[in-house]
Amino acid sequence: MDAYQLFREFYMSLGVPLRAVVEFKIRQRGGNPGEVFEKPWLFLRYVEAAMGRHNAELISMLFVEFVRRYRVDASVAAEALWSEEGWRRFVQRLGGV
């Protein structure tokens, strides 16, 4: 599965209420929620800025659990949404599965 498609599936799995809050907070800060689909590594930065570090870490843990079924190493998945380099490693790992 493509890494971007996998991220979209994860994002949709978060449920409408949580996505609505995240998207509202991103817009409130002048961001574009659609940008996270082009640059997933920005997602947790937006969440952290809008809702605090603890919520960003919680969503990061949910992502790790979500991608576990694709046999992606937890440390690779945990870094994927925090930095561009982490996302690159995630894409490479997922491409090798």
Image (cartoon, grey):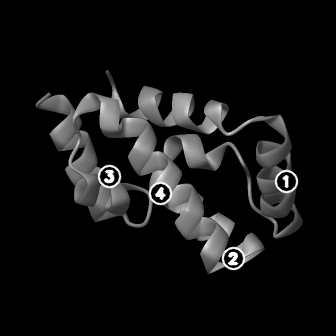
Foreground tag (4 vs 2): 4
Say what amino acid the circle numbered 3 marks.
Ala
Q: Residues within 10 Å of mark 4 (few under 14, many from 20)?
A: some
Marker disc for residue 21: 1
Say what amino acid the circle numbered 2 marks.
Ala
The Cα atoms of the two marked residues, 4 and 1, are separated by 18 Å
Camera-nearest residue between 7 and 31: 7
The Cα atoms of the two marked residues, 3 and 4, are separated by 9 Å
The Cα atoms of the two marked residues, 3 and 2, are separated by 21 Å
The Cα atoms of the two marked residues, 4 and 2, are separated by 17 Å
Foreground tag (4 vs 1): 4
Q: Are marks 2 and 1 in contact (CB under 8 Å)?
A: no
Marker disc for residue 77: 3
- Between discs 4 and 1, the one toward the N terminus: 1
Q: Residues within 10 Å of mark 3 (few under 14, many from 20)?
A: many
How far across and down, in percent of the image, does residue 42 sit?
A: 53, 61
Q: Height in image: 72 above or below 74?
A: above
Is disc 4 placed on a helix, strand or loop?
A: helix
- Between discs 3 and 4, the one toward the N terminus: 4
**What residue appears at the point 76 percent right and 72 percent down from the top-left corner?**
50
How far across and down, in percent of the image, does residue 62 sit?
A: 52, 50
Marker disc for residue 49: 2
Q: Are marks 4 and 2 in contact (CB under 8 Å)?
A: no
Say what amino acid the circle numbered 4 marks.
Met
Is disc 2 placed on a helix, strand or loop?
A: helix
**What residue appears at the point 21 percent right and 52 percent down from the top-left corner?**
89
**What residue appears at the point 87 percent right and 55 percent down from the top-left corner?**
24
Is residue 65 shown left or right of residue 89?
right
Say what amino acid the circle numbered 1 marks.
Val
Q: Are marks 4 and 1 in contact (CB under 8 Å)?
A: no
User: Which residue is denoted by mark 4 in the rendering?
Assistant: 61
Is disc 1 placed on a helix, strand or loop?
A: helix
